[in-house]
Amino acid sequence: MTRIYTRSGDQGESGLVNGQRLTKADLLFDVLGDVDELNAQLGMIRALCADSTVDQQLSKVQHKLFDLGAQVAQYKDNNLEAGDITELEHWIDAWQAQLTPLKQFILPAGNQAGSAAHLSRSICRRAERKAWQAHVKHTIEAEVMQYLNRLSDYLFVLARVLNGGNEVFWQPD
């Protein structure tokens, strides 16, 4: 890239990887924006957390989110595979083995890193919902929605880990 601006989107349209131009109001761009926001928030967790395992896992997830975004933007190859989803499940199982089972709901709170993971989880859920909505009109591989679904589970467990057992439990009236 020689310069960051192109002016090609000034009239409310943007281009996909396949060359197609769509209105910026299209749900595909909502998905891409949510995935971008999620990726930035994962970078925040990495900045807040000194754990090398967390950093390595989130680095891999950030790269996978670029693959996911390329698929949503109609790139010809699907760069997400069932193994990527299985990897998230392995990470979830490994982290969850260190945690006490939940007996009540927890609030999205805690320390900075844990709270950032909770925020990431909610952004991820929004991206998944938007991907399902966009899937009605556009071709989006099932692995995209599955990856986002599993990633939100991973982020929930990660928030618990990062909070180190100091969770804020919901107190019903």
Image: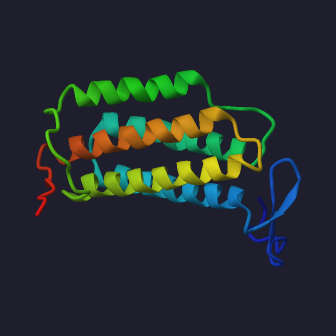
The residue lying at 33 percent from left, 38 percent from top is 54
The residue lying at 16 percent from left, 56 percent from top is 170
Residue 82 drawn above or below residue 33? above
User: From this viewpoint, which residue is outermost toward the bottom?
Assistant: 11
Residue 83 drawn above or below residue 107? above
The image shows residue 53 at horizontal and vertical percentages of 32, 33
The residue lying at 47 percent from left, 50 percent from top is 124
Q: Is residue 46 visible?
A: yes
Q: Is residue 151 left or right of 107 when viewed as pictured? A: right
User: From this viewpoint, which residue is outermost toward the front?
Assistant: 173
Visual colour scheme: rainbow
**Image quarter in which the C terminus is found:** bottom left
The image shows residue 97 at horizontal and vertical percentages of 21, 25
Q: Is residue 47 visible?
A: no
Q: Is residue 44 left or right of 172 when viewed as pictured? A: right
The image shows residue 65 at horizontal and vertical percentages of 57, 44
Q: Of 137 and 32, which appears nearest the observer?
A: 137
The residue lying at 46 percent from left, 56 percent from top is 123
**Which quadrant would residue 172 be assigned to in this image?**
bottom left
**Which quadrant would residue 164 be assigned to in this image?**
top left
Residue 8 drawn above or below residue 40? below
The image shows residue 42 at horizontal and vertical percentages of 43, 51
Q: Of 11 and 56, which appears nearest the observer?
A: 11
**Image quarter in which the N terminus is found:** bottom right
